[in-house]
Amino acid sequence: MGRKIGSFGLINYRRHPENPNYIVFGFNSEQEAEIFETELNKTKTWFEKDTEPTDEGLVYLFAVSESSMNEANLANGMVKRHTREPMFKNILIRYSLIIFIVLLSILALIGYVKNSEKQSEKNIEGTTDTTNFTP
């Protein structure tokens, strides 16, 4: 869903322009539309579908009842799950970043353990009785 769909914006759904009881989902590709339709059919969610030509190409529209919004959001999530691309496509960059984060976490853990050891040594050396309690 790389390009803007019609009047949708950042999210791919909006309220139906004529019937406020329906939410309209829009998808840029036939693959996304097929995944969404399959997921809605799995949960037996009622919907209407249509296509709308735009300047960028064909937009696949699905109208879902507002009462079925939970099922539609789950189906929408499945579409994103199946069609998204990795943030870093280069495998070398991806694994280098993971290794860097793991090493940074290990370094932070070592620093925390060493600092807590120093703090406990200072507390043992500097303990004095401040209660003024004499039996």
Image (cartoon, rainbow, N blue to C red):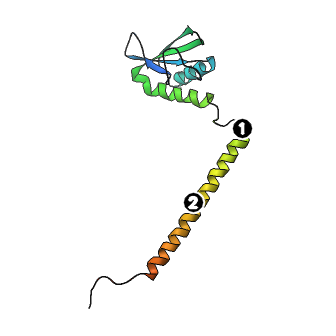
**Dot 2 or dot 1, earlier in sequence:** 1
The residue at 70%/42% (across/down) is 93
Look at the picture and state if 75 lies above or below 63. Answer: below
Look at the picture and state if 111 lies above or below 97. Answer: below
Look at the picture and state if 55 lies above or below 67. Answer: above
For label 1, the SS is loop
Q: Quadrant of residue 130?
A: bottom left
Residue pushed farthest bottom? 135
Residue pushed farthest top? 53
Q: Amino acid at mark 1?
A: Asn
Please rate how many residues cluster around mark 2, counting C-alpha atoms within 10 Å: few if below 14, some from 14 to 19, many from 20. few
Q: Is residue 53 left or right of residue 19?
A: right
| Residue that numbered label 2 is attached to | 108
Depth check: give the residue in front, 82 or 108. Answer: 108
For label 2, the SS is helix
| Residue that numbered label 1 is attached to | 90
Count of numbered tags: 2
Depth check: give the residue in front, 124 or 65. Answer: 124
Please rate how many residues cluster around mark 1, counting C-alpha atoms within 10 Å: few if below 14, some from 14 to 19, many from 20. few
Q: Where does the C terminus fall, quadrant-wise? A: bottom left
x%, y% of residue 22? 41, 16
Name the mark on residue 32.
none
Depth check: give the residue in front, 75 or 16. Answer: 16
Q: Are marks 2 and 1 in contact (CB under 8 Å)?
A: no
